[in-house]
Image (tube, rainbow, N blue to C red):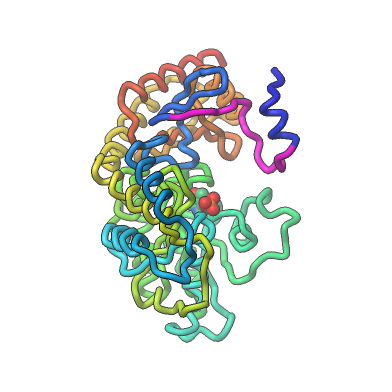
Amino acid sequence: MSNPIIEREQLYCAHNYSPLPVVLVRAQGVYVWDDAGKRYIDMMSAYSAVNHGHCHPKLIRALQEQASQLNIVSRAFYTDKLGVFLERICKLTGFDKALPMNTGVEAVETAIKAARKWAYLVKDVPQYQAEIIVCQGNFHGRTITAISMSTEPQYRDKFGPYTPGFKIIPYGDVNQLEQAITPHTAAFLVEPVQGEGGIQVPASGYLKACEEICRKHQLLLICDEIQTGLGRTGKLLACEHEDVHPDGIVLGKALGGGLLPISVFLSRREIMDVFMPGDHGSTFGGNPLASAVGAMAIAVLLDENLITNAAEMGNYFQRKLREIQSPLIKEVRGKGLLIGLEIDKKYSARTICLKLLEHGILTKETHHTVIRLAPPLIITKEQIDETIDSLQGVLGEM
Ligand SMILES: *Cc1c(COP(=O)(O)O)cnc(C)c1O
């Protein structure tokens, strides 16, 4: 079973992941192909970075056209693309201003900086006493500050000392939020659905209640929509399921159209205006290549009704999954096309993922017992049926 391609990657690459033994060489839409020409349905979508499907022709064209014009110039100058992109994302989401970054965690760090500075300038919190409340089981990225908020031992072990200033409360518990608030609290940072935490969907009404508490106590509600945003849960933003209007949100992943790392922190003017020239920045953030791709990613999301398709196909997929009779499945949960299959602890989710791979389904377990089913938002009923058939085959074999 030794594959020289895998061996080379293992030899030279840090072992900070444990990939499934498949070598991908090509992709189109919801499909990817391995080096032997075998086709798979992508149920990972690169953790929701590929909502538009692989190699979307309009996105490829936007990338190629901009690549031959102007790419990286830094924010030391204006370009003809950044304003267009940010106007589009602001108008779409209803926020006043955006700060462009690259990876998701950079935009999370930006949100934290904004919340802290806002606390000192606007809320008069004593210097460097600002607190940010976060939830158990969160995933906000992998920088030292992001792991400082994490409750996942593996993300934290031997990486301390950690960034102070965070308070961790149980996810889904409104009373604990209210109790954790002090006059020094700057913000509550929360995922509308915890993705990496195992596709955890809080009880309905949770986010709305959090919003009311944040208003009452004058702290910022910041939603990390890096994974849940841009149609994944069947709405543009997962917050919309409860008509929640956060003070700020973080977007990433699918914002890059499956081509580039593009992220933004979006907020009301009053919050973004705490940033002064030189306070914060990124060499690549907001570059014209990323701006052209990001603007097209938003256009395609709307033009091709991907959000509606995510809602409809999400319902269909979840219904089909719930119909499966298998002692291995403990629970099916999710919103839209962000779906988790909780597997009985007696079985290994990774073993199931390996078997699914043989059956032409590409996915990966999270938290040892959860199988993610989060295909590109362009998926069709037929492709979902095909996935259900493969899944039933695998569960039968076990
Ligand atoms: C993936 C993810 C991040 C981190 O994004 P990166 O681009 O990997 O830095 C942060 N928050 C959430 C909710 C995510 O799903």
Q: Residue at x 43, y 36 (%)?
A: 374
Query: In this figure, what is the number of numbered marks?
Result: 0
Q: Would residue 61 be seen by someone viewing this image from the given angle?
A: yes
Q: Nearer the viewer, residue 175 or 326?
A: 326
Q: Residue at x 52, y 42 (%)?
A: 198
- Report x, y in % for residue 36: 56, 18
**Image quadrant containing the C terminus:** top right
Q: Nearer the viewer, residue 34 or 59?
A: 59
Q: Is residue 195 left or right of residue 80?
A: right
- Report x, y in % for residue 127: 57, 85
Q: Is residue 349 above or below residue 123?
A: above
Extreme residue toward the front, this view: 68
Q: Residue at x 36, y 23 (%)?
A: 383
**Image quadrant containing the N terminus:** top right
Q: Is 13 included in the stretch rendered in magenta?
A: yes
- Report x, y in % for residue 359: 50, 17
Q: Is 198 included in the stretch rendered in magenta?
A: no
Q: Would residue 346 be seen by someone viewing this image from the given angle?
A: no
Q: Is residue 167 left or right of residue 229?
A: right
Q: Is residue 22 left or right of residue 341?
A: right
Q: Quadrant of residue 376?
A: top left
- Report x, y in % for residue 41: 44, 25
Q: Nearer the viewer, residue 366 or 85?
A: 85
Q: Is residue 355 above or below residue 285?
A: above
Q: Which residues are magenta?
A: 12-27
